[in-house]
Image: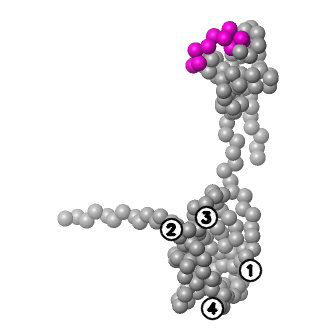
Amino acid sequence: MAPIDIEPVMDAVGERLRGLRRTRAMTLADVAAVTGLAQSTLSRVESGGRRPSLEIVLLLARTYQLTLDDLVGAPATGDPRVHPRPTTRYGATFLPLSQRPGGIQAYKMILPAGYRASDTDQRSHEGYEWLYVLSGRLRLLLGEHDILLTPGEAAEFDTHTPHAFTNPGTSPTELLMLIGPQGERAHVRARPSRAKND
């Protein structure tokens, strides 16, 4: 992760502290009495003539009842990227694409070439699945149905129905999956129909 440029944050601290103090209808004398800091020190910090030490920032954060990040207006440092940790189940590789606990989970699933499942391997469980084939071919055994899906095709089904996947090809099959743990379905929005000319 690239380092955060703290110069702009620190340059804006004084003005931010003055604004916080005024919003709370406090004078420099009021803040000095609460923190034990000299009024002259607080004045220099607010005017930008002095950069506050960590001790000063901590005292002011406690006084204004704010976190350090909120006090100085630090930029968000959260990393929005998902760092998938692959797992292997039944010979297939699953890469989680979402980190939200509960609800619908997103995965990329990779079936190696020649991945096989027989009718007796069909399993059922709580939930609902939606899948989309990215590459390769996917044989979906779904109850009594035997369906071959190719890139760009999608399927959805209740996972109470016994099901299994097979890769009948000579290269890996990659697909995206949305899995709702308690039978939750993905909300698919259709394109609005064009208005007909009368």
Residue count near mark 2 (Cα–Cα under 10 Å), binned few <14, some 14–19, many ≥20:
some
Q: Which residue type carries mark 4? A: Asp
| 32 part of magenta stretch | yes
Per the image, the residue denoted by label 3 is 105
User: What label does residue 185 carry, if any?
Assistant: 2
Q: Quadrant of residue 146?
A: bottom right
Left or right: 127 with respect to 166? left
Where residue 177 sits, quadrant-wise, is: bottom right
Can you give x and y, in whole percent of width and height, for residue 34 in the image? 71, 15
Q: CA distance from mark 1 to mark 4?
A: 16 Å
C-alpha distance separating marks 3 and 4:
26 Å
Q: Nearer the viewer, residue 174 or 55?
A: 55
Q: Residues within 10 Å of mark 3 (few under 14, many from 20)?
A: some
- Classified by dominant secondary structure, the portion drawn in magenta counts as helix
Q: Amino acid at mark 1?
A: Gly
Q: Which mark is residue 91?
A: 1
Secondary structure under badge 1? loop
Q: Which part of the image, by quadrant, shows the C terminus?
A: bottom left
Label 4, secondary structure: give it: helix
Q: Give whichever of discs 4 and 2 has the lower sequence position.
A: 4
- Visible residue check, residue 10: yes
Give the residue displayed 66% in from the left and 29% down from the top. 66
Residue ID for mark 4: 119
